[in-house]
Amino acid sequence: MRFVVGTIAFFGAVLLPFNLDLVKFPIVQALSSPCYPPENPASNAGQLVSLDLRSPEAKTGFVLGSPKEWANAQADSLTPLQTGKGYLIVYVHGFRTSMRNATCVAKAVAFDLARREAVADSVNPDVLVFGWPGETEAQHFSRAQSAALQAAGYLAELLWRLRDREIVLIGHSLGASVVMDAVSQLPLSNDADISFRALILIQAAIPIASLRTWSYKITSRNPAAEIHDRIAGREPPDPYVEEGTGTGCYVGAALKAQDLIVTYSKDDITLSRMYATDEIFLPGRCQGPRLLPVEGKPVRSLPQTVAVGLGIAKAQNSGIHRLPTPPSPSVYADRFREQEDWDKPSLRPPDDSQVRFELTEAYDFEIPHPSYHEVDLEQMPGWRLLFDYHSPLNHPTMRAYVLDQIWRILEEHESSDTRRGQ
């Protein structure tokens, strides 16, 4: 009995305050539910086509054939979608999601859209569910990222063949990476262009800087050397300053859509913890500027490590990094014996005379898309303990809230376009 009480006390006093996410993550995962199908589905929903890249023999592998060969084999399934009218909803699921769950979500989105008569061309919305082999183990997130990049080529081929439709493209979680990489590859020929009615990213597992542009100013100086020069009567050299601009890898793709809509929640435990189990985002994959970590601040607050779905975006990011001068040999020997790292960058050493190098970074971020919208999931009415904010379209209540926000945005855009045309 004492052991049980002691364990509970230790858990509550030590683990809970300092590792709350570690506690919440398995609980949220256990409480998360698959997609609830919609009740009383709309009778005016259109065609539903499901195309899966998973190999029948190995669910974590791809089908054989190039994107063009695979798309040619799906010609019969694509024909009704190519000739349809109104919206075509293309839904791409995320990491560790079954085709059954993805189809349920896509149906719910289409039925909800079909009910809203105020939305132009909302009658008979067709649906394409695009499946890809993202069902790897939870600790193999980087492997799923590689699969998402490969799947993007197949999705791009499908979108190109459906380019005459008014497409609403939805990507959930890592499916957002599939969507944005696919759109980045379009057009597939120079004699035609392609645009989308909307790009909707649900809790997107892509770097937050990938949808932004930025300007930066990096200044480096040697404070200790400057003080030494002044003591010697010399004017110290000017600091080295580097200025420039940058563009996120998905900015051009996002501009191919009339509206760019993203959902986010700072309490998306699944999204924040998923990267902790592996390599975060693949190195060099669309991360944007690589800011140095600042002492006292978590690494996961940097733009290159934050996902769009977490919504932890800052218009400005700055940091000062100071490297102290090494101590005298005798002090260094003592610290070496004590296994201390004297060469570790420090934010506030005692004074400039002890700083041999200082680097100051300043970044200003902007979202260049003219019709960018955010939906904060935590603004949904009602209080929910340990809610799975990562899969809002699975739960009927959350789904109704999210879709209502999205369709309102599309309606407002269409209304403003109509007014301008009159």
Image (cartoon, rainbow, N blue to C red):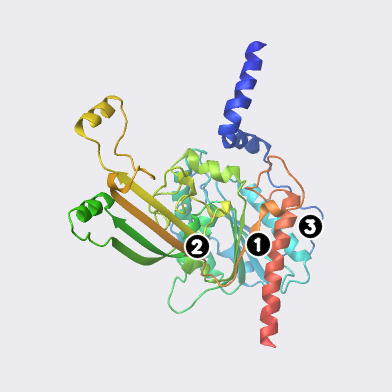
Residue at image x 70%, y 66%?
A: 407
Do the numbered discs 2 and 1 sit on residues whose CB atoms are within 8 Å?
no
Looking at the image, residue 205 lies above or below residue 241: above
| Pick the front one: 188 or 329 | 329
Q: Which residue carries the number 3 mark? A: 41
The residue most toward the right is: 40
| Pick the front one: 145 or 153 | 145
Secondary structure type for disc 2: helix
Q: Earlier in the sequence, mark 2 or mark 1?
A: 1
* Drawn side of residue 165 relative to residue 400, left or right: left
Q: Earlier in the sequence, mark 2 or mark 3?
A: 3
Please give the label number shown on residue 23: none
- Depth-wise, is mark 2 or mark 3 nearer the camera? 2
Q: Measure the C-alpha gap from mark 2 to mark 1.
A: 26 Å
Dot 3 surroundings within 10 Å: few (below 14), some, or many (20 or more)? some
* Drawn side of residue 244 relative to residue 118, left or right: left
| Spot occupied by residue 282 in the image (x, y as percentages of width and height) | 41, 49
Secondary structure type for disc 3: loop
| Spot occupied by residue 291 in the image (x, y as percentages of width and height) | 40, 53
Residue at image x 62%, y 13%?
A: 3
Dot 2 surroundings within 10 Å: few (below 14), some, or many (20 or more)? many
Amino acid type assigned to the residue bearing label 2 in the image? Leu
Q: Earlier in the sequence, mark 1 or mark 3?
A: 3
| Spot occupied by residue 4 in the image (x, y as percentages of width and height) | 65, 15
Secondary structure type for disc 1: strand
Q: Quadrant of residue 6?
A: top right
Q: Is residue 52 visible?
A: no
Please give the label number shown on residue 211: 2
| Spot occupied by residue 336 in the image (x, y as percentages of width and height) | 26, 28
Q: Measure the C-alpha gap from mark 1 to mark 3.
A: 14 Å
Amino acid type assigned to the residue bearing label 1 in the image? Val
Please give the label number shown on residue 127: 1
